[in-house]
Image: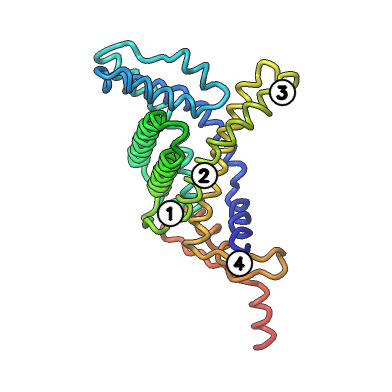
Amino acid sequence: MSFAVAVVRRYGEDRGRQYGALLSYYGFVSLFPLLLVLGTVLEVVLAGNPELRAQILDSVYARIPVLGSQLQSNTTTLSASGLLLVVGLVVAVWAGLAVVRSGQEVVSLQWCVPRFRQRSFVSAQLRALGVLVVFGVGVVLAGIATSLAALVPDTAWGGRVLVAVIAIVLSVVVVSVIFRMLAASDLRWRDVAAGGVAGGVALWFLQLVGATYVARVIVGATDVYGAFAAVFGLLVWIALLAHVLLLANEINVVRAKRLWPRSLTRTAPTDADRRALGETVRRESFLSESRVVVRDPDADARQLREG
């Protein structure tokens, strides 16, 4: 229980709600160019296997609530070739990287990476591109797994459980790799394992429950939202994903830095409270020569009285 309280406290200190909203915006803006890139790349790579390409795209669109069916019926790709195709892909990827670049910023902030240790512009773009590739491979593999699941008979519960386990494992691996790549810090696999498992399982659960909730409750309220219901529903869905992933990464941070137990009041801070405050202050350092010291005024006052 104390660990959960510490995660929630740290989430607030790292401005999780604000960054979740920012990721929701960039996620919505990045979704369409990334789908364009995915469709174009699959059309080139799987030119000799249109059935597999269609199955992968159908699986991807099925994971997008509200607008997934509409996007599926209006699949678009870059029809140009040669230089124009390359230019089009570069522009689309650049637009799609907005959410990844924002993710780098917030994950590094959660890990309290000082400003002078942030990646350079070129390094950050290359790492963001790598994250995008990992995510794309995960999406393609998930699409293939879904295609295999369709071959399992409805009565074969063992087969369906196996497919669900494979989907969860794949989600955990992708989330863990992305967490490690986003932070501008040398993290070990054990540093991201707990959050990777929590985030992967939560994403799988949201696929089962969240999309149904958004489609029936949010989009169903057409009297309130009118024509904006579909767009609003998709934003709600992306916001759920963003907050779940940020909370999962806070699990990694609190566990790795041992930032628990936390006090419920400001009058009796714990050791973890003091270390959390120190981490928050140090991450704002602009110069490597800076030395930040966080002192406890109550402890200083006691020392003066005793001295």
Q: Are marks 3 and 1 in contact (CB under 8 Å)?
A: no
> SS class of the residue under badge 1?
helix
Q: How is the image coloured?
A: rainbow
Residue kind at label 4, given as amino acid type? Pro
Q: CA distance from mark 4 to mark 3?
A: 42 Å
Q: Residues within 10 Å of mark 4 (few under 14, many from 20)?
A: some
Mark 3 and mark 1 lie on one chain; the one further toward the N terminus is 1
Task: Say the numbered circle drawn on residue 221.
Answer: 3
268 over 69 or under it: above or below:
below
In the image, taking residue 212 as reference, residue 137 lies left or right, namely: left
Mark 4 and mark 1 lie on one chain; the one further toward the N terminus is 1
Name the residue tied to disc 4: 261
Q: Nearer the viewer, mark 3 or mark 1?
A: 3
In the image, taking residue 244 as reference, residue 108 lies left or right, namely: left
Task: Say the numbered circle drawn on residue 192.
Answer: 1
Q: CA distance from mark 2 to mark 3?
A: 27 Å
Q: Are marks 4 and 2 in contact (CB under 8 Å)?
A: no
Residue kind at label 3, given as amino acid type? Ala
Tell me what residue is drawn at x 53 percent, y 44 percent. 202
Q: CA distance from mark 4 to mark 2?
A: 22 Å
Residue 121 seen: no
Residue 161 is situated, as x and y percent measured from the top left of the image, at 45, 42
> SS class of the residue under badge 3?
loop
Q: Quadrant of residue 189?
A: bottom left
- The residue closer to the viewer here, 299 or 4, is 4
Task: Say the numbered circle drawn on residue 245.
Answer: 2
> SS class of the residue under badge 2?
helix
Tell me what residue is drawn at x 51 percent, y 41 percent. 203
